[in-house]
Each structure stands twice: as C-alpha cells, then as structure tokens.
Amino acid sequence: MCGITGFNWEDYQLLQKMNEVIAHRGPDDQGVYTDEEVSLGNRRLAIIDLSPSARQPMANEDETIWITYNGEVYNFKEIREDLEEKGHTFTSNSDTEVIIHGYEEYGIDILHRLNGMFAFALYDSGRKELILARDRFGIKPLYYYYQDGNFIFCSEIKGILTHNIERTPNNRMIFEYLQYGLIDHREETFFNHIYRVMPGTYLVFDLETCSIAKKKWYSLKDKTVLDLKEIRDSFFKSVTYRLVSDVPVGSCLSGGIDSSSIVGAMKDISPETEIKTFSAIFPGTSIDESEYIKEVVEKTDVHSAVVIPKIETLIEDLNDLIWTQEEPFLSTSIYAQYCVMKLAHKNSMKVLLDGQGGDELLAGYPIYFTPYFLELFATFKWKSLISEGFLYIKQHKDVIPLFQLFVSFTRSLFKTHDLRPGWIDKEFFNRYSRPRTYVFRLNEKLVETLTYSTIPGLLRYEDKNAMRWSVETRLPFLDHRFVESVLYIPPEYKIKRGITKYIFREALKGVLPERIRRRTDKIGFATPEDQWFQSELFTGMAESILDSDSFKEREYWDGEKVKKTFKKYKKGKKRLRRTVWKWINLELWLRMFIDGQ
C-alpha cells in the first residue's frame, strides 16, 4: 500500500515535494524515477515483501517499463506462477512486479486477471505512453490534472496542489453536494481541472501528442448464486484473500452484521491467530453498540480496542480532518472512522479489514425498503406489498418507507425538480438544478448506490482516513466475485419478513452470534450529531463561521436566511443537522483549499 505521484516532464525537486506531502501514505520508504519524459514518485507502506527489493518505482529487466503502484493484488502468487511458466523471472516477492511482467505478457488486459484494489501509473517508454488504471470499484483513489499540456497525477489531491496551478471551486459539484448530498459521483472533483480516474477505468496519456484516451475496462456481471453454502464459501474466500500479508491483519468492528461477519470469518479461517479489533463507541447514547461489540468479542475471543469520539476532540481535529479528506463530506460519522484508524495506528496496526459494501449489495439500510415496495407495487405484487409493509412496521415501528413510496411515485410521474431550500441562492439553484429520476426496482437502486451515489464517497472516506494514519483497509464485501454472486439476487431473498440482508443472514448462521444475526435495528457508522451540534462548543463555532464576511459573500447561499434557519435548528424547530454540517464543512474547505487560509 502506497501513495503515487508523477507528471510528464523531468523535475526531481518538485517530485520530492509531491512525495513529502503524501508521506503519511507510505512512511516506510520512498522512491523516485525521472527521465526526459516523466517523473514518477512513490511513498511505500510495506505490507507484502518488506525487503528493499520491493522498492518503487519498479522497472522490468531492461528498464523500458516502469510502475508506481498503490494497492494489493490478492491473487498475485497465482498470476506469478502463470508468468513464470511463460518464462518471466522475478527479483522480488511483491505483487508490484507481477503487474509489470503481466503487462509485458498480456498488455493492458492484465487488469482483468487482477483480484484486488489498486491504482497505478505505468510508463511504457517504448510506446511513449503513461497509463493510469484504477480497480473495479475504485477502492484506491487516483487523481489527475491536465491543462496546457501539463499532466500531473497523484493518489491525493494535495500532491497535485504542490504545483503552481490555479485553484478554483467546481460550482456544479458544490451545488450537487448542497442540494442532493452527492460526492465522488462524477469524474470531476470539487476543484476545477482536477479529475479522478473513474472506477474500472484506465487512461492513456500520449507523451508525444499530450492527448488523453480513456476506456472502461470493467462492467458489472450477473453471476447470481442462491445456494447458502456457495454464498458463505464465496464470502469466506474473499476474507481469506484479504488475509494475505507479511504483517498482522486486524479488523474494524462496529457490532453490525457486516463487520461482525468479517471478524467471525477471520476467526474460523485462522483460529489460532490473535486478531485485534478496533471500534468507536458512544456510551449513554441511543447509537452506542458496545453491547453488540462485546457479544462478538466474547464469541470469537478477539482483542478489542475502543475509542470514544467527542465533540471536543472533533473541534480539535477538524482542520486535520478537512485536510485529510480534501473534499467536503456529508456528516461527522467520518470523524468516528478517523478516530478508529488513529487508534489502530497507535496500536501499531498496518492492515485492517472493514465492512464497506455489505449494505449496498444486500439492501442493509431501511432506505432500501422504499424501492422494494415500489417494485412490488409496479409489478402488481400487491399481496406481497401489504404483507411486507405490515411486517416492516412491526419490525421497525415506523411508516417512513411507505410514505416515501407515495412521494417517489408522485415525483416520478411529473419528473419534478427538487424544491429549492430557502437558504440556497436562487440564481445558483436555477443554474444547476435538473429534474431527477427515481429508481423503482431494488436491484437497480443497489447498483446505483454501489456505482454512483453512495459507495464512491464511502470509499474516499475510507482510504483518506486510513492512509492519514498509515493504515491499509481491505474490503471483503467488494471482492468482484462476491459482488457478482450476490448483487443481482432477486429482491425477495434480500428483504423478507421486514428483515434486510435475509439470504446473507441465513448463509452466516453459526458464524455470527445469534443476537447480531437477528438484529433488525440499523445504526450505521454514526455519531451523536444532534447532541454534538446542540452543544455550546459547536454552536459557538458555527455562529462565528456563519457570521463571518467570507461566508456571507459566497455565491451559494443567502447568509441571512442561513442564520435564521440555524436559529430554528438551535431551538429544536428544524431537523437540519446534515444541512448545518454542509454549511460549516464547505465554508472551512473553501478557506483551506481555495482561499489559502
């Protein structure tokens, strides 16, 4: 696991500067390569092959192909055996070298053989090409800037910002963040002229013509499995792959089904290995999951370390959190994750498994009941709709998805714009607002959240928070083989009797403690935001920001209406904590990254 840097000209000092600003991604080693065509840099977090022979940038035997690489290829030993049979020789035990020889043998099609998470830049000096590639779901980030013939890339945006480039905000991204809560859903970033290589895509930069060609190399496939044993085996195989490491591997643990399944699988796969888990807890609040964490710890006999994030520490860490994330984010739940990764770092852990993706594949959130009910309604399965609606109310004690069914159906008929919040500037709203489409089928909604609205942002949070503390996180639910086996499972196997993730719960019998396997409440990785945001510490900070000249002068909102809305929130008359956070986060981001404060 590493950080990668580079650009299309030779400048050793500038490359070193890029490496320094992302040193947290790879504190164990660094390397550079330059010639008249390119500069390539790398910061290394040593996890597989800890020896100097795995140093990057790395080249083939005649140094015609160079690579700077970030990630893990879990099946690299199998690919290596295939390449050795074809006559390739290796000088290291790293997965990096497998990609180089794989490219020599198969060209860019080597991507299809890789099972893992990765982002790399490969320099083919013979073809005068610089190839940037990213894994299937975009677990590892890769950004680039292209303007006036200058092509710059980096694992993090802050590396690109070490160059003397103009910093201006991308107002369309800001609108979609404020209005729809969308992030990381486009190739564009919150910075004009800085883009992300999209998931499952590679980019070829021609060093002679300075032109860019992009190609999507991966698309979702339907390889549905309904057999419980096959689902369990697929999940266990994914976890097994993610235990490949030359350093100890631990896990995040929230007490929910996903992280608990991972810890249970780890213990079943390697019962004699000491496993460390890391959790955020919130004693005395409705979102505290300490009792469920304890349940898993007692069943699996793992070591448990916990942290209690507080509003006081959030305020202290806020500037570093914003610097870490580089683009605005949607809630303070990101801070809980930041604290867990910091805790792992303090405990000298380099590798953790985490449960991202489970909810988006298996309909784990209550929001997924709405598209499921819509699908039952639209396909005339009204008996099932009535039954599932009743069972949902019985299990969850609310009627929100049924109300949302009516609202979504009505909006879809008229294809209306979302209503403009009174605090958003009218001209700004009218410039970017578009009619929205609504998804009527559960699996279509799951694909949308996996590829567009939810997972891309969660993966950005995950990578930035973990690598800020020099920790690599691995995500068993996003093994492409597991994804393809469960994503398109018919909806009635995912939501049944008012219970989410039904088929996965059945497949994991015996692995999960029964109390957790039967949980119907869904907390998510949350923080007690309303409690935090009503505190004097937060409201004092918020009011100083909302009263500032810089906030009032932004083109995105009406400053006076924002203040009035915030006063209503303080009095408990409006439930607007996400909106309040977006005001604060965006303003502080603008000051840090655009205004240069």
Image (cartoon, rainbow, N blue to C red):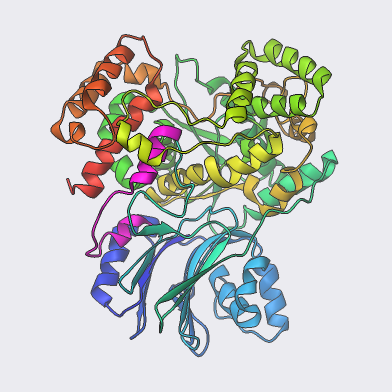
Inspect the magenta stretch and tell me whether residue 86 lies in it: no
Where is residue 112 drawn, in percent x and y? 66, 66
Q: Name, please, the residue furthest toward the left.
A: 549
Report the span colored magenta.
Answer: 156-180
Where is residue 60 drawn, in percent x and y? 52, 84
Q: Nearer the viewer, residue 193 or 509?
A: 193
- Tally of marks: 0
Q: Residue at x 64, y 84 (%)?
A: 88
Position of residue 595 in the picture relative to residue 575 (left or right): left
Asked if residue 50 shows in the view, the reply is: no
Residue 10, compared with residue 435, is above or below; it is below
Residue 192, compared with residue 428, is above or below; it is below
Quarter of the image where the C terminus is located: top left
Residue 489, compared with residue 217, is above or below; it is above
Q: Nearer the viewer, residue 380 or 100?
A: 380
Position of residue 238 in the picture relative to residue 538 (left or right): right
Q: Residue at x 24, y 16 (%)?
A: 536
Q: Residue at x 42, y 21 (%)?
A: 528
Inspect the magenta stretch and tell me whether residue 178 lies in it: yes
Q: Nearer the viewer, residue 151 or 407?
A: 407
Residue 331, compared with residue 567, is above or below; it is below
Asked if residue 432 shows in the view, the reply is: yes
Position of residue 114 in the picture relative to residue 531 (left or right): right
Where is residue 273 drawn, in percent x and y? 63, 46
Q: Residue at x 42, y 37 (%)?
A: 433
Q: Nearer the viewer, residue 455 or 405?
A: 405
Position of residue 544 in the picture relative to residue 258 (left or right): left
Where is residue 374 drawn, in percent x and y? 70, 26
Q: Name, please, the residue furthest toward the front.
A: 414
